[in-house]
Image (cartoon, rainbow, N blue to C red):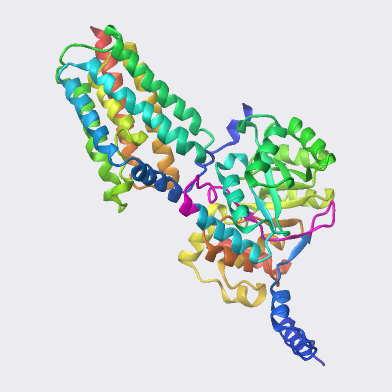
Amino acid sequence: MKRRPDRREFLKLAATGLALAGVPAGLLRAAAASPVRKAIPTSGEMLPVIGLGTWRTFNVGSDPQLLAERTEVVRAFFQHGGGLVDCSPMYGSAADTMGYALRKLGTPDSLFSADKVWGPAGGSAREQVARQAQRWGIETFDLMQVHNLSNWRDYLDVLRELKAAGKIRYIGITTSHGRRHREFEQVMASEDIDFAQLTYNITHREAEERLLPLARERGIAVIANRPYDGGALIKGLKRREQVPQWAVEECGSSTWADFLLKFIISHPAVSCAIPATTRVDHLNENMRAGRKPLPSPRCRQRMIEFIESL
Amino acid sequence: MSDWDSYRLQDFVPFSAEVYFRLQERMGEAFWPLHLAMLAAGAAALFLALRGRRRLACLLLAPAWAFVGVAYFLQRYGNLNWAGDYLGWAFIGEGGLLAVLAAIPGGAATRVPRATLPVIVGTTLATAGLLAWPLIALLFGYAWLHAETFGIHPTPTAVTTLGLLLIASRGAALWLAALIPLLWIALSGLTLTVLGAGWAPAVFVVLALGLGALVWKSAVTGQR
């Protein structure tokens, strides 16, 4: 029986063919390494599956040394083809840090700017959106979310008006740490929203029961926050364990970042995971996890069983 | 606001340990050698309180609180935490309150304090705030510019003030003036706990000592 070439063999064959045809090898490598993208259900627009969170990590005030370091993280993110960057008025100076980085680097076409409105930040929703856009140094946001369901009825009304006026492209709601899932589900079921952001990782899979199936049914894109459970999950694994060989061979996961992030983004309902980091080497690891192959359903189950056995 | 019950302690510390300790260092870089003048003012306030010159002691504390309110909270911490501006105004308000206690004859005690338990605890806390607090950073491996100092950083300012109030004040004035230092020490302990700082438990020990001495002093004063 004739064996079909696997992916690696196929790329080698293609490279040989294209090299013979005069296509530069660098272009081919870039195509092979490009991030996996998933469609936003309400528009079909493709979004890279690994984004960038800014909670805690980008809140550095006016410290020039730390601003320069975070700018390098943003530079590496876009060099890897990154898209979605998520922020909030709750995150202190994180929006100013993004503004600083974009002024230094320019605003790449791939940027998918996501921010939030949040009651305690003060001012109306319109004022908050305008203030955050000013801090980022951008004209319009791609996505504006209601943070932690704060005053969500009023805020969603305003965000819909802003979307209709072309000031923002998508609207959504957020929660984290498994908070207020029942109310979150009600909003997902009853309101016209494009995105739902929630906590989903291999040790916190409550969203699999109702929220992720509902997102698929309603055509809502899902952003998974806290992919490393605030950092504790990956730090603990890196300290204690080696990535098992079967995960390398069967799930394409040679690092713990691969293992944890590929698990999340391989869920059919999840559009994007948003790990946060202060370090370029960690950012590189995160972005590599957004490339193929992604684990199969059988492999995902084995990943769960492995983590639960620790 | 009903939303608040869904937040956790970690949500109120929106910065990393790296950024927090860099803030302490930036205060050191920006204001050195003001530290020496502030320490001298704090030591003078302790000396005056123990000699019975208590209104003057309160007067020396007031500008330290106002300075920390503006330079630490409004100008720096406020960039990192949306609650920073409120804390800045609370510190400025505490400075104003201490100035009022210094101005009103009945606002602070006037006799030389006897060596009662609250006075002993107060002296211990004030000495710890002035001398021991700057050493914590060094003990935990940070550079000397990280050293938290009375009149420059909020926690040693609050600890020293709490100690001096235990020596120099009593009754409603004592509780009124001790409220913000107590709240800040509690917040500082919680912040350090979230950030995983090794000395966070020591902050809660200081809080418990101060609160216990306050209750003791109020109970004893109330019996007279």
Please give the name of the residue rendered at 82% of the width and 92% of the height, measured from the top-left corner. A2
- State the residue at coordinates (27%, 12%): B108
Residue pictured at 63% horizontal, 56% vertical: A52
- Location of the N terminus of chain A by quadrant is bottom right
Question: Residue A203 occupies which quadrant of the picture?
Answer: bottom right
Q: How many marks?
A: 0
Residue situated in front as seen by the camera: B88 or B189: B88
Which quadrant of the view contains residue B50? top left
Q: Can you see residue A50? A: yes
Vertical side of A247 occupied by A128: above or below: above
Task: Give residue B35's position: percent from left, percent from top.
Answer: 28, 38
Query: In the rendered view, would you say B71 is above or below A178?
Result: above
Question: Residue A132's x, y, as percent?
Answer: 65, 41
Question: Looking at the image, which is closer to me, B6 or A30?
Answer: A30
Q: Main secondary structure of the magenta part?
A: loop
**Residue B32 inside the magenta-drawn segment:** no
In the image, is B48 to the left or to the right of A47?
Answer: left
Residue A99: x and y in percent read 61, 49
Which region is colored magenta?
A39-66
In percent of the image, x 66 and y 65: which residue is there? A262
Q: Position of residue A226 (x, y in %)?
A: 60, 52
Q: Is residue A65 magenta?
A: yes
Q: Do we see residue B187 in this rendering?
A: no
Seen from the viewer's position, the closer of residues A216 and A85 is: A85
Q: In the displayed structure, does residue B97 sit left or right of residue A110?
A: left
- Establish if A301 lies above or below A160: below
Q: In the drawing, does residue B111 fall left or right of residue A172? A: left
